[in-house]
Image (spheres, rainbow, N blue to C red):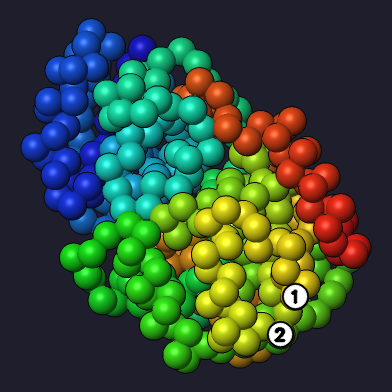
Amino acid sequence: MKAVAIVNPVSGRRQAPRRWPTLLKTAGLNAMGMMTWWTEGSGHAEVLAARARREGFERVIVAGGDGTLLEVLNGLWWEAKGRLPSVGMVSFGIGCDYIRNFDVGYSLTEALVVALGESLIPVDIGMCHLHDMNGRPVQRVFMNVLGLGYDANVVERMLRQRSHVHGRIIYLLSALQELVRLKSHRMKAEVDGDCFQTDTVLFAVGIGCYFGGGMMITPGASPQGGRFQLVWGHHQSRLEVLRLLSKIYAGQHLHHPRVHTRYGRHVKVTAEPQAYVQAEGALIGQTPVEVELYPMKLQFAAAKTKFGPLAWAKNRATVVGTKRGGWS
């Protein structure tokens, strides 16, 4: 198999350049024939991924975090020449939330072996139409969680602060800081043709379960589920948001009476005032946004999903039993 690893050297607290050569040796023969390309800055992983597809690579390994994965996905998706490669991941980054949906072992060595292995899982992709930070129309694809409002504001603060603190801690610190200037948005949403309005601080569109360094924001979602799980809170105060932060890690926030959820495959959202939009922990633009699901469009290297169809159905049934309506 013709494989290439796209490695972000600043991921893993800038330890990737030192750890990657050692990891290749411990992974054994499977890693010996693989090429390594290093990113040189923001957006470069997207350029390298497009090159990998043009040059006929069968497998692209992402060595970095969710932001690197997002760039690689878009580089592969929008390149017209060549067949779409399968993708594997070795999580060196801060959040690494997408990989939490899968069984890839417990060490980086095991993750690399799985990323180069024969076991492939077809996963869903989300296509979003929105406006960039300068108001120009853009299109991006994502594979985990899209967040509007509060969560995107948290991401913007994290990027602005460039703290040396990483992972869950920096997300929580930024989330608490954003509570001080918590802003509600009047959102109009259309889900598979069904329209509704809400005053909310956050609107999440999930293919996978996690964001923010392990927060299970959309616990009924699955990369193989065939539809998004949508989660939003209606008329929430600062105190309610603060109380919910700890519950989100366990996926228990859906029991709150002001938290609502439903499923769909085609979503349109407008917001007043305009809301930031993030995907995989990267700020990608602002509302209005239109999102459509493309089922089973990418092959991802993993042994199995932790949240496959049976677990997904069980989670959904549990939530349905605790909510009064709200499902598509």
Which secondary structure, mark 1? Answer: loop
Q: What residue type is labelled 1?
A: Arg
Give the residue furthest to the top. Answer: 29
101 relative to 157 in the view: left or right: right
Residue 112 badge: none
Q: What residue type is labelled 2?
A: His
Read off the residue under disc 1: 258
318 relative to 138 in the view: left or right: right
Q: How crowded is mark 2: few (under 14 residues within 10 Å), some or many (20 or more)?
A: some
In this view of the protein, which residue sits in the foreground, 242 or 121? Answer: 242
For the point 78% across and 72% down, the residue is 257
Tell me where residue 171 sits by quadrant: bottom left
> In this figure, what is the number of numbered marks?
2
Instruction: Report the Cα–Cα distance between label 1 and label 2.
Output: 7 Å
Read off the residue under disc 2: 235
Which percent across, then down, holds residue 69?
Answer: 39, 45
Which secondary structure, mark 2? Answer: loop
46 relative to 81 in the view: left or right: left
The quarter of the rendered structure image containing the N terminus is top left
- Labelled pair 1, 2 in contact (Cβ < 8 Å): yes
In this view of the protein, which residue sits in the foreground, 278 or 78? Answer: 278
Which percent across, then down, holds residue 205?
Answer: 64, 59
For the point 38% across and 34% down, the residue is 89
Give the residue furthest to the left. Answer: 18
Which percent across, then down, holds residue 121?
Answer: 57, 25
Q: Is residue 197 above or below residue 5?
A: below
In this view of the protein, which residue sits in the foreground, 196 or 50? Answer: 196
